[in-house]
Image (cartoon, rainbow, N blue to C red):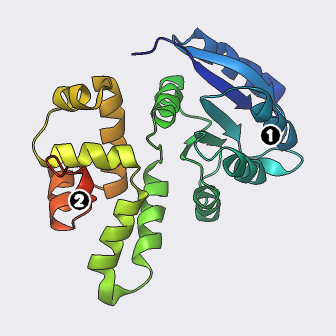
Amino acid sequence: MSSLPLKILLVEDDELFRLGLRVRLQQETGFEVIAEAEDGETAVEMAKRHSLDIVVLDIGLPGIGGIEACRQLRQLYSNLPILVLTSHTQKSLINRIIEVGAQGYCLKGVPSETLILAIRSVAAGASWWDSNATSEIRAAFEKESTATISENSSEKVASTLTRREQEILALIAVGKTNQEIAEMLYITPGTVRVHVHSILQKLDVRDRTQAAVIAIQNKSIAPDLLPGSE
């Protein structure tokens, strides 16, 4: 596995908060804050100048704002992971964050260990949503038609899983352990745990067994991802 640090763009307009966050992140093994910005326009410019692994983006920015900055970053670099920082949990804000393509959000008041895990999760290709956001995502999928909710919502919940999450869910469904999955996909067991956490949140289940049952019953995995489907 690569030992290169995660290259982070930190976008926050509160200078004191940004300083504290930068100091905390740089204390973490494997993290490097290589650029900072205090508004949306600068964030986009910094992304153009640096090779990044993740953007940690405050949503309440001056100028074009965090939502528009996120939208522009996703348009420029569709594979660049973005974790939104916010102190709000309104449904309308969650919807907007989802719409512009952020991989998740983290509340500013959470313990630093939670933020670190969120950054690692999003950088690894997973996503990070709290229970409010997860409920909102599911509600959006279930809104369309109660008559066809079972078929349609299961398809759309599956569509929220990243390709990597679907791969891992497929392996869970055939009984593979985290260690076995890590060896098969050439990733660490810790990365597998991060993805499993995201899968459980998105499917709104308590454990991997329930996730496997949903995957099998609702055909939530692309057939080409199932083991043996060469």
Which amino acid type is shown beneath numbered disc 1?
Val
Mark 2, residue position: 223
- Labels 1 and 2: the sequence-earlier one: 1
| In-image side of 168 versus 227 (left or right) | right
Q: If the image is split into quadrants, where does the N terminus sit?
A: top left
Residue 96 x %, y %? 64, 61
Residue 190 x %, y %? 32, 24
Residue 3 x %, y %? 47, 11
For residue 218, above or below residue 160: below
Q: Tell me if mark 2 has few (under 14), some (14-19) or many (20+) residues whose alpha carbon lies within 10 angstroms of its own.
A: few
Q: Tell me if mark 1 has few (under 14), some (14-19) or many (20+) residues whose alpha carbon lies within 10 angstroms of its own.
A: some
For residue 144, above or below residue 174: below
Q: Pick the residue in front: 94 or 81.
A: 81
Q: Which residue is painted at 57% across and 58% down in the image? A: 98
Q: Which residue is painted at 20% across and 49% down in the image? A: 230
Q: Pick the residue in front: 81 or 145.
A: 81
| In-image side of 175 versus 138 (left or right) | left
Mark 1, residue position: 44
Residue 178 x %, y %? 20, 31
Which amino acid type is shown beneath numbered disc 2?
Pro
Q: Quadrant of residue 183?
A: top left
